[in-house]
Amino acid sequence: MTIQGLNSPIQSMSVYHLLQAREAERRPIRVGVIGAGATGRAIALQLGTPVPGMRLAAISNRTPEHAERSFREAGIRDWQSAQSAAAAEAKIARGIPVLTDDPQVLTRCGAIDLIVEVTGTVDFGASVVLDAIAHGKDVVMVNAELDSLVGPILKARADQAGVVLTHTDGDEPGVAMTLFRYVQSVGLRPVAAGNIKGMVDHYRTPDTQRSFAEKHDQDVRKVTSFADATKLSMETCVLANATGFGVGRRGMYGPACGYVRELAKLLPPEAMLSGGIVDYSVGAAPHTGGFVIVHEENPYKQTQLAYYKLGDGPFYVFYTPYHLPHIQLPSTIARAALHRDATVAPIAGPSCEVVAVAKRDLKAGERLDGVGGFCAYGLIENHRTAREANALPIAMSDDCVLLRDISRDEVISFDDVRMPPRRLVDDLWQEQMRRWPLEARSGAGRGQEAIAEALI
C-alpha cells in the first residue's frame, strides 16, 4: 500500500495514513446517509468536502427535497435518483451520487460500505438500522433517542452479523468516550464521565423554543429535547451503557460551576468510587464538550499531577472543549470501516435508561406526545431502579394514553398508560429485557409484562 508521491509503502496503521492510501488508490469508503434534517445536512456538507479516502455516495430522505438541499449545500450537482438497490449500485460505481426516498435502496446497495443513520426517529430509525445490519453494512447511529432505548440489543444483532454498530464521535457520548478510552490507555482510572451543559429547564416546550428553532433552522421538538434535559439524559445513557457506569441519583447531580475542573470537588466521591457515574456540569467553561474524572491515590503521582496544574486530587478532571458532530463523524466512520472499532457502543445490557417524567399535571385520557413535546421530559435512571418502578421509557411514550391523572414531576409507569398498537421498538425492547433479565426480585421486570398485556 503506497501513497501517491511517496516512495515507500505505508508503515503506519493510523486512520490518517490509511485514508490517504484509500484516496490514492481511488478506493474511498462509500457512505450512505439516511436522514436530511439539520444534522444530516451538516454531515453531508462535511463529507462532500470531500474527506480524503471517503465519499458521500448517497442520501435517503422521506422528503426528497431535503436530500436535494443537502446535496446542493455540499456542492454536489451531479446526483441522480435511484429507486432500487441495483440502480443505485450501477450509478455509484460510475461515481454518481444517488438520491432516494427509500432507505432500503441504500441499506441493500452493494456499492455502499457504511450507513450513517441520522433520522432522529425511534421506530423508523430502528427499521433502518436492522435492515442495514441484515445486509452486512456497518452503521453509525447519530440517534441518541434510539441508542439510549435499544442500543444494547441492536449492538448484539450487529455482533451476530459481524458488522460494526457505533454512536458517533462529535456527539457528546462519543467525545467523552474517546477521552475515556484515552485515559484508560495511559493507566488512569476513570470514575465519572459526562457532558458540559449550558442550561437545563425541564419545563421548556415547543412553544418556548420555537423562535430559537426557527432562527437556527432546527426542528422545534429536537431543540425542546435539548433544553428540557431529555437529550442530555439520552446522551449520558448512551455513555453509561458504553462504560458500565450508573447514575448517583435519578437525573444526575448536574452541579453549576464556573469551570469544569470544579467537578472534582462537586460530585460525590462515594458515588464515583462505587462503580463510576455519568453526570454533567451546568454553565461551566468551556461551555461545551465532554469530561472524564479520574481517581488517583498515589501521593507521588498526586504531586506530579499538581505540578502539571491538574489540582490537588484525589479526583482530576480531563476534558475536551468542543463537540462537532459533523466534523468528528468522519473519524468514527474511518475507525469502523478501517479498524473495525466502535467509537462508543454498549458493552453489555443496559446500565441506565431514560424514563418519562410529567412536565405538567396530566389528566387521564391525555395522549403523550413523546420526546421534545408538551407532556413529559426524560430523566436518566439506573436500569434496575427503573425496572423495579416499572417506569415507561420516554422514547416509547409517544401515543401512549394515560389511564390516571399524573402530577407534575411524577415518573410515568407502564401501569399508568395504554400502549399504542404494537411497534418495532416494543418488540426490540422486550427482546432486550429477555436477553439481560434482572435477577429475580419482587416487583422487578414488570415492563415486559405490561407491554405484552397492553398489546393483547
Image (tube, rainbow, N blue to C red):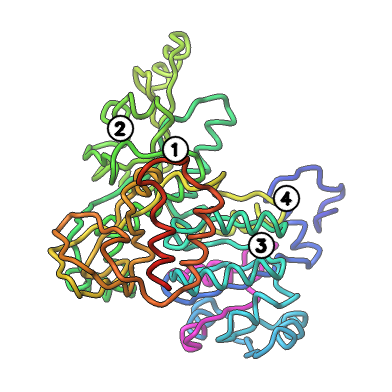
Q: Establish if 393 lies above or below 254.
A: below
Q: Which residue is label 1 attached to?
A: 245
Instruction: Please state which of the two labelled residues, at mark 1 or mark 3, is closer to the viewer.
Output: 1
Q: Is residue 51 magenta?
A: yes
Label 4 or label 1, whichever comes before in sequence order:
4
Give the camera-side residue of 278 and 116: 278
Q: Establish if 192 lies above or below 14.
A: above
Label 1 or label 3, whichever comes before in sequence order:
3
Is 167 on the left or on the right of 365, as rendered? right
Label 2 or label 3, whichever comes before in sequence order:
3
Is 386 on the left or on the right of 88, as rendered? left
Three-letter code, disc 3: Asp
Give the distance between the C-alpha atoms of the residues marked 4 and 1, in whole angstroms. Answer: 34 Å
Q: Which residue is label 3 attached to?
A: 138
Q: Is residue 307 magenta?
A: no
- Neighbourhood count class around disc 1 (C-alpha, 10 Å): few under 14, some 14–19, many 20 upward: many
Give the distance between the C-alpha atoms of the residues marked 3 and 4, in whole angstroms. Answer: 21 Å
Q: Which residue is label 4 attached to?
A: 17
Instruction: Please state which of the two labelled residues, at mark 3 or mark 4, is closer to the viewer.
Output: 3
Q: Where does the magenta region start and end?
A: 39-67
